[in-house]
Amino acid sequence: TAAAPRPWRLFGAMCLVRLPRITQPLEKEEEEIAALMGQIELEKSHYSDHEIRKLQEEEQLRRRKESAYDDDDEAPGKTVIMAQDLEDKWEQKLLQFEAAPRITDADKNNNRTSLNRKLDSNLMLLVKQKIGNQELWLLPQVEWQPGETLRSTAERAIATFLGDHIQAKILGNAPYGIYKYKFPRAIRTEDNVGAKVFFFKAFLQSSDLSQAELKEDYLWVTKDELGDYLKSEYLKKVNRFLLD
Amino acid sequence: PCRAQPKKKKKVDVKREQAQKDRMKKKIKKLEKAAPEMIPIEDFITPLKYSDSNRVRSLPPLSFEETERRVLLMKKWCLFKQKQDKAEWKAIQTLVEAQQEALKELRLESEELYQAAIRRDEGLFPFERDGPNYTPPLPGYDPPEGKCVDITKVYTQ
């Protein structure tokens, strides 16, 4: 028997992930253990050259003070750089350097369209799309066309919403998840029972999106914030393939 | 009689030279047969200047409370890591299950798309990525100039 044409429409969706740029803050246990490990390492170690020099100089200073400032014949004209001075100089240099802040302005304003927010977690792209007669927040998706693989459908989805100049590393040819839904009875026909959306995952490689021509509303959200925008069934399926 | 003598000298010389050459060849063969000298691993040899006694740190001995605290902390850490590991394992399991479900549905749809999906992606590995740092990169930062001179010793066998 010939295979009947399936009544499901296929969509390819892409979950574009911006990987974290800074490390997550340590948990309380991790901090305690880190302190303990440092202490054990200090106890098991020997003195380094710098420390020996420092101890010797302290001894010399102490001896000079006790013997009441006689023999200064080594010192006239010669300024000896002490190890303590070196340490102070290095400390000063460190204090002068100002690193970029870990909590950026976008964090403070809660500007969800910016990529500079929440630098220590994964950010996913959400786009507002019109399905049927509803405007919904979804992962960018386009309909599959015969002749292309589902992976190229997902690539087309990115290109449609963000333009061609985005570099993304797609993780493999296989889909990561699937969301199946049936159309409401009003639109359902024999050949068109519902739709299957296959999700693919990609890592964002290009760091700035100034060249992106974004046509619709878009948001970059973390996994916890997905619940604010996605519907519950869709969210359940999406959460399965997202690692925190 | 006059003719024979010079000939003898030549023979003896030739014999002696031959013997010398053989001895030299034997010596060369012996040297080659001996095992090649091991390349010393510099990490495993502690330089003698670090075994001086004045290098040993003098610290007060640990009190009983301190050792107790350390042991309890290590046990808490053990539990913490175990929970973390189990959570990671569970997350990977759900990931794999979700993918298997998606592939099953895809197979129901069309065999051709399924075959295209399970094909190996050649461009994926080797996968390189710069790891996350403690602070984000400072825009317009000019790092100080410097030259790096490599002084590692290279041994040949």
Image (cartoon, rainbow, N blue to C red):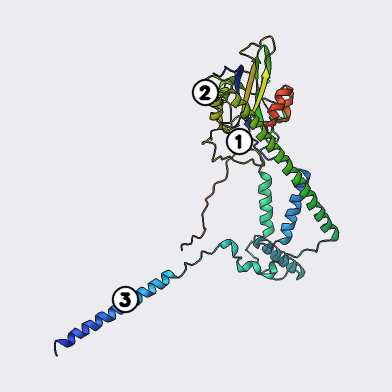
| Residue A53, quarter of picture | bottom right
Which residue is located at x 58 percent, y 43 percent?
Answer: B143
Which of the two marks, 2 or 3, is nearer to us in this view? 2
SS of the residue under disc 1: loop
Say few, some or many: other residues with alpha carbon within 10 Å of mark 3 (under 14 / 14 to 19 / 20 or more): few
- Disc number for residue A148: 2
Looking at this view, is B35 or B42 the one in front?
B35
Q: Quadrant of the C terminus of chain A?
A: top right
Say few, some or many: other residues with alpha carbon within 10 Å of mark 1 (under 14 / 14 to 19 / 20 or more): few
Looking at this view, is A95 or A122 the one in front?
A122
Which residue is located at x 22 percent, y 82 percent?
Answer: B11
Q: Of the residues shown, which amino acid type is indicated by label 3? A: Lys
Which of the two marks, 2 or 1, is nearer to us in this view? 2
| Residue A155, quarter of picture | top right
* Spot occupied by residue B139 in the image (x, y as percentages of width and height): 60, 35
- Whole-angstrom CA distance, mark 2 to mark 3, is 77 Å
Q: Of the residues shown, which amino acid type is indicated by label 1? A: Pro
SS of the residue under disc 2: loop
Residue extending furthest toward the left: B2
Q: Of the residues shown, which amino acid type is indicated by label 2? A: Glu
